[in-house]
Image (cartoon, coloured by chain):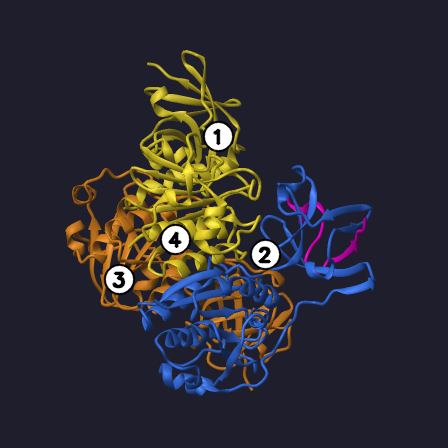
Chain colours: A orange, B yellow, C blue
Amino acid sequence: MKIITLTTDFGEKDFYRGQMKGVILKLNPEVRIVDISHKIGVYDVFQGAFIISQAWKYFPEGTIHVGVVDPGVGSRRKGIIIKTSCDFFIGPDNGLFSLALKDQKVEKIIEIDEKKVEKIFNDKISKTFHGRDIFAPAGAWISKGKKPHMFGKKLKQPVRINLPEPTFQNNDVIIGEVIYIDRFGNITTNIPASLLKGKVELIIGNKRIKGPFLSYDSVPIGTPLLIVNSFGYIEIAINGGNAAKILSLERHSPIKIRRLYG
Amino acid sequence: MKIITLTTDFGEKDFYRGQMKGVILKLNPEVRIVDISHKIGVYDVFQGAFIISQAWKYFPEGTIHVGVVDPGVGSRRKGIIIKTSCDFFIGPDNGLFSLALKDQKVEKIIEIDEKKVEKIFNDKISKTFHGRDIFAPAGAWISKGKKPHMFGKKLKQPVRINLPEPTFQNNDVIIGEVIYIDRFGNITTNIPASLLKGKVELIIGNKRIKGPFLSYDSVPIGTPLLIVNSFGYIEIAINGGNAAKILSLERHSPIKIRRLYG
Amino acid sequence: MKIITLTTDFGEKDFYRGQMKGVILKLNPEVRIVDISHKIGVYDVFQGAFIISQAWKYFPEGTIHVGVVDPGVGSRRKGIIIKTSCDFFIGPDNGLFSLALKDQKVEKIIEIDEKKVEKIFNDKISKTFHGRDIFAPAGAWISKGKKPHMFGKKLKQPVRINLPEPTFQNNDVIIGEVIYIDRFGNITTNIPASLLKGKVELIIGNKRIKGPFLSYDSVPIGTPLLIVNSFGYIEIAINGGNAAKILSLERHSPIKIRRLYG
């Protein structure tokens, strides 16, 4: 059974998510639809890209990932279909899939041609909701075996966004930033654990937070710690507490980490 | 594969949604359940009606739409099953489906008879949760091929709610109101674009907002505009911004639009 | 078709829910996954236990309930698989399933052995996300017919949490507390209706709230009332209103109820 995942900034009150699912099921009643998230911050392409990059790899090979965080809908930004050695990714060409693409081989990128699509779908495309009118039906068609090249022509360079790069202040001090905060207040930084072998400390005002530890309960309840998260980056957490709130850190907050010796 | 959609004001924390799904799957393990929204404002029948009216038509023919926004549960308000030329609608008889019915032919309306239902379901019906005890199982039975008339007798006139009607102040000025605001802050009015042919402006304090434009990016980022939304009504938006917040408009706020010439 | 339900405190923005679903579908593409709730309060094991206890019994026999409210992840708290005469329950051994177990016969409890699991799953287990790395795949394997004892050895006594017990002040007055508040502001107390036969009143400051009534509309709109909820406990509600907000009651608030005569 084919799977289509959905990742959007549509929220869960409005009818947009439901419309997309109806469109998909009308075209392919057998496909399975899985919501990854509809709570991406409004127009927050980076957050959407990060979430897709963390989720896609857990799905079976051949899964079709439709993503819609699309501040430029109706403008000249393109729509794309990406076929990788693993999966399909369908959505606006604004970098939404670029973090996910780092871990797989891109085989083909198709720039969606709205005129071709209107002919295939036998329907008019709105200027305000490409998620429903282009990306969802394209996903459904691909789940039924249609080839991406039917929907347009090859694109060489899709728009890319990148994780911000950490910088060295000197040999032992590295400056990064907060890139993601989850519901628990756990803070993901852009600093790969591999950059700072061995023990380190985070310097925040006059506080020092040590790590990396193996698990949250390596320190007493209420104590901040550093940990290496599931994709190899330094995470700031508090055992049993909300690190983002207590440490007053948010997306883009600068992070300073120092290597420890001895 | 049959589809049952759910639209409720139950939220997503509580166990109500899960109970309804369990009840359905116990009766028909093969049916597919799709959440349209569980975030309808508490007891907000109009909002539920609007969301159902926007979502139902995108689903395959024969879909069963169960809606529960039900301030009168346990009172003398009736439960109904509506069969149209397209789909089924099941829920309280309080107008929740009346906006959806405008676009399709009603074939039959059945008033649910709780005593008949208790016999069919072989179960006692609570006074506090008809979504779980009547509407979800009725949907499951209908998805298995049972006919609506098994659940009660014909009803002539269901309760109806309507979109509020805009009024003309003079030939060129029309007064309407806000009927829906989505997560992006886009504002749907009750003014059909067909009423005001050609260019118009919205008058709000000493601001003038022009349109309708074809797409959000027809104006610079941060600029308000009017657009015709996907069901033909005037929508107030801000390119890349939250119109409802910035213009301080909410549900029921009055809207004044003037025809432009020249 | 087998069903796996998910109940977690992961929220719906992050990718944790999506990762769990991907893991399950990779192992068993045919299983059906139903979200009960991902909005359990962060680390609120009691709330999770209450919600699972209200939801599980509506699902078909043999359903696999995976629950993850897991403040002790990575610590020495165990993971468990419980087989009852009805269903399976999989998650941390912290009491999360203990309210659900009251209504069914426990047949077997297995303490999950991480080393066995790593061998079966052929994968390394993280210290920070057992929902994805242990409980979701264990659920998927069980949905494919694997036996619980494959994952570890028998456990005699799982961790239990209980509903707090109400106490009698004298023959006619009982002191309880608020145990759950839903989206509507309806308040579930820990006082079983069976304790206080006949009419009672709730004493709150100088207010008296009478009941139990049969349905919300037994009193005028805006009036508080007592009702017996669907599992036999006294519930405080307001017809058409939010009782928790208007009466300023929250989880753990003390509740005083007096038997009425005559």
The residue that mark 1 highlights is B178
Outermost residue, top side: B170
Q: Residue at x 46, y 57 (%)?
A: C13
Q: Chain of mark 4?
A: B
The residue pinned by badge 3 equals: A2
Q: Which mark is residue C230?
A: 2
Measured from the top left, where is residue B73 in percent x and y?
A: 55, 43
Task: Look at label 3 and name its amino acid.
Answer: Lys
Q: Is residue B72 above or below residue A191?
A: above
Residue of label 4: B140
Q: Can see residue A136?
A: no
Q: Is residue B141 magenta?
A: no
Query: A104 or B12, which lies in front?
Result: B12
Q: Identify the amino acid type marked 4.
A: Ala
Q: Amino acid at mark 1?
A: Val
In magenta, the rendered stretch is: C242-262
**Local SS, label 3:** loop
Answer yes or no: do the residues labelled 2 and 3 have beta carbons within 8 Å? no
What percent of the width, then of the height, locates residue A49?
A: 37, 58
Whole-angstrom CA distance, mark 3 to mark 1, is: 41 Å
